[in-house]
Amino acid sequence: MQNMLTILTSVFRGSLSKNGSKVVVSARTYADFTPQASFDIKKCELHRLEQGPPGEAVLTREDGLRYYRAMQTMRRMELKADQLYKQKIIRGFCHLYDGQEACAVGIEAGVNPTDHLITAYRAHGYTYTRGISVKEILAELTGRKGGVAKGKGGSMHMYAKHFYGGNGIVGAQVPLGAGVALACQYQGNNQICVTLYGDGAANQGQIFESFNMAALWKLPCIFICENNKYGMGTSVERASASTDYYKRGDFIPGLRVDGMDVLCVREATKFAADYCRSGKGPILMELQTYRYHGHSMSDPGVSYRTREEIQEVRSKSDPISMLKDRMISTNMASVEEIKEMDVEIRKEVEEAAQFATSDPEPPLEDLCNHIFYNEPPMEVRGTNPWTKLKSIS
């Protein structure tokens, strides 16, 4: 609806002449825009697959505007989180997702809302695509009562329906994701689980154990390695003897995907989801992407890579710029329309930040709420103040 209003209000766009009368300089309607277009996309590299996703993707104007709004909102939200952290309003760990927006938006475009998703601690983007508002995400980062986890989770622990978080232990979400896929299989609901991890977690033993069990039981699980080239401050070449992450499932088929192109990610995810739903078992995807910030807010991100490297990726492969250029060059959107959307997004993020800095912190009496525990607290010598607290589920 917002996009309809944007266009309808720009039907008569003009400027004042010297005598003060209104001169119409453009009049744009829906009919002026291309409703859809096809784009050539980078072909995926394949492992144990005879055929992969198509090398062409169809994009509708409606989907393009939706993808752009989601990615730009994510970008602005993360930049605002960066600002709040530097102002010491956000404390503790904070891992930002800017640069990787095409991964989250492309994956969501390739699966159903009823499918399940679990990721590591760089989770803000997926929290947003899973339906949580910017306001609730930023309020969680600032530890406020209105946050998605009531201010108790912070950057790494946000949840939504069919979304099992942000997980702080490196690689530990992968066996959990395999377990969710087992539940889908057991219930026979034709749902799948998207299980994400980073290149820094790719050498964890529990990941290979999960691969083995998922393959044995033919679990409907898409294992996705978001390869942003650096695990903390270590490049993939220094951390892994093999950087072909899409092949490291060995007996599990794999795809290597351009993770900076939302259409590539969408088509690959659709292909992988169909594969899982057909009963063939798990599949592995490697998304080649890039993070603009450091590993976390405590990492400036330029001691192990150059500013020039980051700038080159921004200028040549930015996922938001790529989508915008495609839409404008094919007349699927106007520059003015995109600018108006950017203004709306900035306003939304600013209002969310205002809420996140003014909402009250959760009171102490809420400390034991939402704890899944049916027994009264144990009495331990020296901890008398805590015996007054009762857990509430």
Image (cartoon, rainbow, N blue to C red):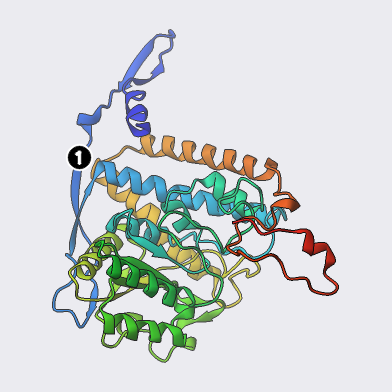
Q: Is residue 347 left or right of residue 222?
A: right
Q: Which image quadrant: the N terminus? A: top left
Secondary structure of residue under mark 1? loop
In this rendering, the count of numbered labels is 1
Q: Is residue 191 left or right of residue 35?
A: right
Q: Is residue 250 left or right of residue 274?
A: right
Task: Look at label 1 and name its amino acid.
Answer: Pro
Location of residue 347 in the rendering, given as x and y in whole percent from the top left corner = 53, 37
Q: Which image quadrant: the C terminus? A: bottom right
Location of residue 200 in the rendering, given as x and y in whole percent from the top left corner = 49, 79
Q: Residue furthest bottom?
A: 241
Q: Which residue is mark 1?
A: 35
In the image, is residue 147 above or below residue 280? above
In the image, is residue 326 above or below residue 316? above
The image quadrant of residue 286 is bottom left
Q: Nearer the viewer, residue 287 or 180?
A: 180
Which residue lies at the image location 32% right of the left edge and 30% below the top edge?
A: 4
Q: Nearer the viewer, residue 309 or 354?
A: 354
The image quadrant of residue 154 is bottom right
Which residue lies at the image location 19% right of the left edge and 72% below the top edge?
A: 279
> Can residue 289 be spotted in the picture?
yes
Q: Nearer the viewer, residue 225 or 234?
A: 225
In the image, is residue 344 above or below residue 117? above
Mark 1 surroundings within 10 Å by alpha-carbon count, few (fewer than 14), some (14 through 19), many (20 or more): some
The image quadrant of residue 233 is bottom right
Which residue lies at the image location 37% right of the left edge and 59% below the top edge?
A: 102
Q: Residue furthest front?
A: 375
